[in-house]
Amino acid sequence: MNILITGSAGFIGYHLALKILKTKSNVIGIDNVNNYYDTNIKKNRIKKLKQHKKFFFYKIDLSEYKKLNNIIKKNNINIIIHLAAQAGVRYSIDQPRAYFKSNLEGFFNVLEVSRHNKIKHLIYASTSSVYGDSKKFPLNEKNTTDFPLSFYAATKKSNEVMAHSYSYIYKLPCTGVRFFTVYGPFGRPDMALFKFTKNIINNKSIELYNHGNHLRDFTYVDDIVDGIYLLIKKQSKKTIPYEIFNIGNGNPKKLLDYLKYIEKNLNKTSKIKNLPLQIGDIIKTHSNINKIKKYTGYKPKTDIKTGIGKFIEWYKDYYKIN
Ligand SMILES: NC(=O)c1ccc[n+]([C@@H]2O[C@H](COP(=O)([O-])OP(=O)(O)OC[C@H]3O[C@@H](n4cnc5c(N)ncnc54)[C@H](O)[C@@H]3O)[C@@H](O)[C@H]2O)c1
């Protein structure tokens, strides 16, 4: 199989590419390597992926439709895993246009190339943020997602409904995957685990929103990747194949407890600067993962103690900290 991963210089795209490269399939990666966070991290991920003979990379933006179309034709792509997006809830408050461009216009181009090239399966990233302020826990795919709290979530919810129309009209097999707070080695510098670890090591204070009372269904990146991979292998039997799945851990933890694990692992305490709850932030996420379990046999394997340990091990090695 020839699998296209959009956002392959990104955190999840990199890990997914590594997993697929262990199989017989070729991975064709695209990414615009934008500077939302340190581009060296993205370049180093690509460098590692390029060590594999079955990995091919193109630096393009999702808005470059013709180039995208040519890459798909030239590489005989069967499956697209669409992970490229402007991520981050807080950044969407100041920069909504970046989300409009990558997540709406960009996603439209992905749908268009998929239909014109008769792609067998389009799997695209959505987010737990689409549940907004839903209080029906654990969050199940049938819960309402009509009231997103951030523009980021609004673009992801839009992707789900756009995909539905393409699957209905053009019979394009589409699967949306709602990820729950993903963490792990080579993770994103804008996310809590990276920021906390960096500041604790450098004796700087950490910014803790809502006194760390958020509950998050932290999911280790290898579990997310396993979930996606199980869905790649499973073919839909429906005539209008359209599915949405949560991919989470199913075991939420308080942000403050997450921080305690980091402190314990680093054997250091943090200096905390408490900040109020940010607009657009969700207090609690907790995934119901029964649907993907039943459909694919998905089972998350990594608890936060182990996962945080693996991240810190990577961080120290990457930044050469003793
Ligand atoms: N990490 C999480 O906790 C999480 C949770 C829920 C959903 N998601 C979603 O999963 C996907 C992957 O997230 P991630 O954590 O790996 O983020 P990431 O930012 O590390 O990866 C996204 C990649 O997409 C690329 N990109 C962005 N806009 C592009 C464009 N217009 N054209 C080409 N490339 C573009 C970026 O350069 C980046 O390398 C995203 O769609 C994100 O919204 C992530």
Image (cartoon, helix red, strand yellow):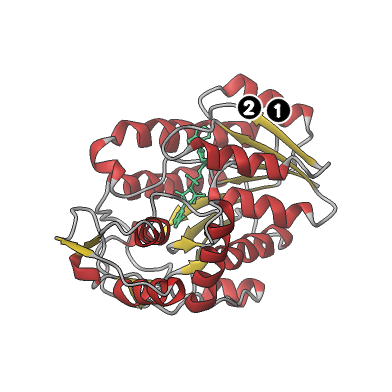
Q: Secondary structure at mark 1?
A: helix
219 left or right of 216 in image: right
Q: Is residue 79 left or right of residue 273?
A: right
Q: Indicate the quadrant where residue 102 lies.
A: top left
Amino acid type assigned to the residue bearing label 2 in the image:
Leu
Looking at the rendered structure, the secondary structure element under dot 2 is: helix
At label 1, which amino acid type do we have? Ile
Furthest toward the left, the residue is 276
Is residue 123 among what the camera can see? no
Label 2, ligand 1: CB separation under 8 Å: no
The tally of labels here is 2
Q: Check residue 71 in the rendering and tell me which mark sits there, or answer none.
A: 1
Residue at 25% in and 67% down: 283
Badge 1 vs badge 2, beta-carbon distance below 8 Å: yes
Q: Nearer the viewer, residue 142 or 302?
A: 302
Residue 132 x/y as whole percent: 28, 60
Task: Determine whether, in the image, residue 96 is placed left or right of residue 111.
Answer: left
Where is residue 71 drawn, in percent x and y? 70, 27
Near mark 1 (Cα within 10 A), the count class, few <14, some 14-19 or many ≥20, is some
Q: Residue 199, percent across and down?
A: 35, 57
Q: Residues within 10 Å of mark 2 (few under 14, many from 20)?
A: some
In the rendered image of this protein, does residue 71 appear above or below residue 229?
Answer: above
Mark 1 and mark 2: Cα distance apart in space: 5 Å
